Image (cartoon, rainbow, N blue to C red):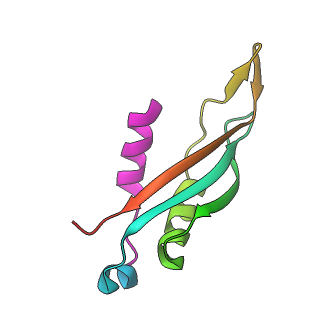
Amino acid sequence: GGMNALYAYLVDNIKYPEKARRKGIEGRVRIKFVIQEDGSVADLKVQKSVEPLLDAEALRVVANMPHWIPGQQEGKNVKVQFVLPITFSLQ
């Protein structure tokens, strides 16, 4: 589904932590992960933290993503590293 499907997935699945909402915490969390040869998501790390509540929600939603179409090189599936910024905004 490409980037449009990724953004739709994020919009549908991110649940703004209520405690962070009450405190007015906003920001952009960057999650680094690897798409494995089978399309699964692995090796998740917070590359840029905002606040532990937002970091945890970003990790949760990325960990639960459906499988990706794996990267290919010379006709073989390969691991691909990806960094995904997830913005939490109270607008």
The residue located at (67%, 60%) in the rendering is: 45
The residue located at (76%, 29%) in the rendering is: 78
- Residue 1 visible (yes or no): no
Position in image of residue 39 (x %, y %) = 67, 36
**Horizontal side of residue 30 vs 22, given as left or right:** right
**Horizontal side of residue 78 vs 32, given as left or right:** right
**Horizontal side of residue 24 vs 67, given as left or right:** left
The quarter of the image holding the N terminus is top left
Examine the image and state in which quarter residue 5 appears. Answer: top left
Q: Against 91, is 18 above or below?
A: below
Q: Which residues are magenta?
A: 1-17
Examine the image and state in which quarter residue 59 appears. Answer: bottom right
* Residue 42, magenta (yes or no): no
**Horizontal side of residue 72 vs 10, given as left or right:** right
- Residue 11 visible (yes or no): yes
Position in image of residue 6 (x %, y %) = 45, 41
User: Looking at this rendering, what residue extends furthest in the top direction?
Assistant: 74
User: Looking at this rendering, what residue extends furthest in the front direction?
Assistant: 48
The residue located at (55%, 71%) in the rendering is: 56
